[in-house]
Image (cartoon, rainbow, N blue to C red):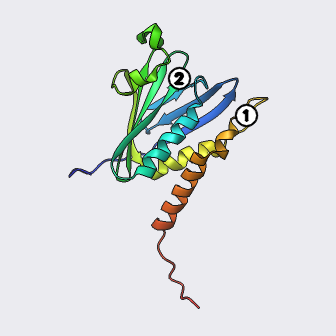
Amino acid sequence: MGSEQTIRTRVKFVYEFEGHGWAHASISNGTDTYAMEPSYLPDDPLFGLLQAVVEIVRNGGDNDTGCEWWYEPALDRWALHREGDSLRITIRHRGGDSFPNSSIFSSSRFWSSELGELRFTATCDLWKFAAKVRLAVSQLTPIGQDDPTWVQRTAEYRALCDFLEEHKRIQSPPSSKPKR
């Protein structure tokens, strides 16, 4: 990290699967709250965020990744930037009218740019945010015939659980009990 200390805020993240290919989600930094209703087309939004969080935890050090949440046809681009144990989250929104018709589902054009309206930004503790994503995945339940719980059985979810347990183990002070 640079010479100046990063100021972290507490981030609240809520995700609720609503069925029929939609979810309600919100993220808040204590001052600003951004509410979202992402679609499951073309991808599962929570799984995309899970993949991004696993990637940023796995790679360590300072790195960047992200994901996209679609709103048919608008989208949010989540940009995640890690510096040590700090995570900067930036969400930019692009409305359907800002996409050329031929590239509406071509996210790679949007991915590399900083285009879009800034909707949310915060810097928080990486491990606390990772735990919030893990909690959101663990609380998924089927609604009718829609079953988003497949995410709980993925290698990415297992990896995030393992990373968090390892981090917790490393952060815990050694036991002061004498060995027998």
Furthest residue toward left: 3
Residue marked by disc 1: 147
Give, as a three-letter code, the residue at label 2.
Answer: Trp
Up-down: is 68 above or below 47? above
Report whether residue 81 is seen. no
Q: Quadrant of the C terminus?
A: bottom right
Label 2, secondary structure: give it.
strand
Who's the residue at 48% across and 44% down the image?
53
Pointer 2 local density, CA inside 10 Å: few below 14, some 14–19, many at least 20: many
Q: Is residue 92 left or right of residue 39?
A: left
Q: Is residue 172 left or right of residue 3?
A: right
Q: Is residue 67 left or right of residue 179?
A: left
Residue 149, how many percent across, how many down? 69, 39
Spatial CA distance of label 1 from label 2 is 19 Å
Residue 130, how many percent across, how many down? 50, 48
Label 1, secondary structure: give it.
loop
Q: Which disc number belongs to residue 70?
A: 2
Residue 175, how many percent across, how many down? 51, 79
Residue 143, how many percent across, how many down? 75, 31
Up-down: is 100 above or below 132? above
Observer-nearest of 29 and 153: 153
Up-down: is 151 above or below 84? above
Give, as a three-letter code, the residue at label 1.
Answer: Asp
Q: Say whether marks 1 and 2 touch (CB < 8 Å).
A: no
